[in-house]
Amino acid sequence: MAWFAAPEYRLARELFLRLLALVYACGFLAAARQFRALLGSRGMLPIPRFLARVPFRRAPSLFHWHYGDRLYAALAHTGLLLSLALLAGAANLLPLGAATALWALPWLLYLSIVNTGQTWYAFGWESLLLEAGALAVFLGNDRIAPPLPVLLLLRWVLFRVEFGAGLIKWRGDECWRKLTCLYHHHETQPMPGPLSWFFHHLPRPLHKAEAAANHVVQLAVPFCLFLPQPIASAAALLMVVTQLWLIASGNFAWLNWLTVALALSVLDTGTLRRVLPIGPDPAHAPQPLWHQLLVAGYALLVLARSWQPLRNLISPRQQMNRSWDGLHLVNSYGAFGSVNRVRYEIVLEGTRDVHGTDGWQEYEFHGKPGELRRLPRQFAPYHLRLDWLMWFAAISPAYARPWFRPLLARLLVNDPDTLRLLRRNPFPDNPPALVRAELYHYRFTNGPELRATGAWWHRRHVRTYQRPVGLAELGPHAPPETPSHARPHAPPDAPPHAPPGRTPKEPGERR
């Protein structure tokens, strides 16, 4: 089976695997730092409550056998250490079987996290990481040549990511067909980056050129991935350039970084030698029969499971970012099927006075817009989950129904795990007596406004999003371990905690 090996992709395999390991590390780091407030036993959407009503077959996870916050932390930190070891090239130091098992471990651990993550993990890049991570298990290490079937399956993933995103745009918002979506997108995207203000103020003809180039790269170029070299490599490099443009223009967690990794897996050594001083290919050991059989079996499984994503692509009712099985082996992708024309932001405020006469002070987040003079920061590929969900909540309160009141309850007791997700707590010594949420319309300032005021944002009050509330109303949503003297009993007719819902896996679409 000489055709099975593709030694000309040895560097492509290394580039893909190292960048994948970096993305894994970001995912596990975010899980370790954020889970207690979001998903822990005292979190806004506790995992134990989820496990009590969702069976293993619907959401496979190691936590179905046992859950504890310490176990979750140990699992996340173990995944982080494994990812860093893989990033450093540990798989190349091991026999092929051990390397295969080493790549399977972070996939299993992250699957357990995603499948119990509920609303906080309902994003397309979670499934993309798991699908790409599952294929990495079968790529082998530098002792053997990369298996060609796995490389082709990586191209199939990349094709669905790009073509699915292109189709959902073309079929969705008419501004994509008119090439005007980028008049608004850089300003209204979920989490702007430090360069987003400048991208927003590019000339409108350039915005149209951006949209047109996006259609070409996402609707036409993906088909070139399956053509002979160097055409396939040229197509992949075009995708890398567009993804780097997106990385510079905003914070989209690791979606763009993982797409770059997939595109790098397409580059053959001959193409790379044209721009880099690369030596001759080393000799590889023959691929063991057991590994060939393993790869062939998984390739057949992926092809069989690809029917639903393929059917979804050609359907006029295309769904974006849909997981078709609990293992996330083959998924449907897409991004920004619609673009918001205006930006709304929820501002959380608190006061020490139970009558609200002592003045209201604002909480600040790390990533979402708040303070007007603060330039947006770069966080991607790290994922600020609460900041992202606050963007959805500003679009519609329905997106926030499962977790918003529990969030307010934790602010009223200065819950340390929750406060670690925020940039500034205006009540460091004693918790507020009341909290509320106000809805504002935010827009980027223009050049003269920036020079005159030093503000990157201008905002206008729209309405009250959540009237002032105290612990007497939010008692059922407060952390279980809150001392009884600090948490008054709720009245008998207090609403129960709403069950965790499903929010968009990507902007513009509900799953």
Image (spheres, rainbow, N blue to C red):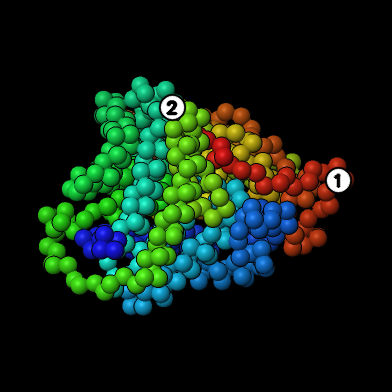
Left or right, residue 422 beside residue 9: right
Asked if 374 appears above or below 107 in the picture, the reply is above
Task: Tell me the element at label 1.
Answer: loop
Does residue 28 appear left or right of residue 268 in this picture? right
* Quadrant in the rendering for residue 372: top left
- Where is residue 381? Give x, y as percent: 40, 54
Assign the N terminus to one quadrant of the image: bottom left
Three-letter amino acid code at the position of disc 1: Pro
Graded by Cα atoms within 10 Å as few (under 14), some (14 to 19) or many (20 or more), the crowding at tag 2 reads some
Task: Give how far across and how far down residue 50 sits, in percent.
Answer: 69, 54
Look at 66% across and 63% down and name the residue there: 64
For disc 1, the neighbor class at 10 Å (few under 14, some 14 to 19, many from 20) is: few
The image shows residue 456, relative to residue 122, as above or below, that is above
Foreground residue, 313 or 44? 313
Identify residue for label 2.
Answer: 171
Mark yes or no: residue 384 visible.
no
Q: Residue at x 48, y 63 (%)?
A: 107
Instruction: Please state, as top left, top right, bottom left or bottom right, where the C terminus lies in the image.
Output: top right
Residue 491, which numbered label?
1
Q: Amino acid at mark 2?
A: Arg
The reply to whether the C-beta atoms of the residues labelled 1 and 2 are less than 8 Å apart is no
Q: In screen coordinates, is 75 left or right of 446?
A: right
Q: Earlier in the sequence, mark 1 or mark 2?
A: 2
Q: Quadrant of residue 169?
A: top left
Please say whether residue 266 is visible from this viewpoint.
yes
Q: Is residue 149 above or below residue 96?
A: above
Task: Name the secondary structure under disc 2.
Answer: helix
Q: Residue at x 79, y 43 (%)?
A: 495
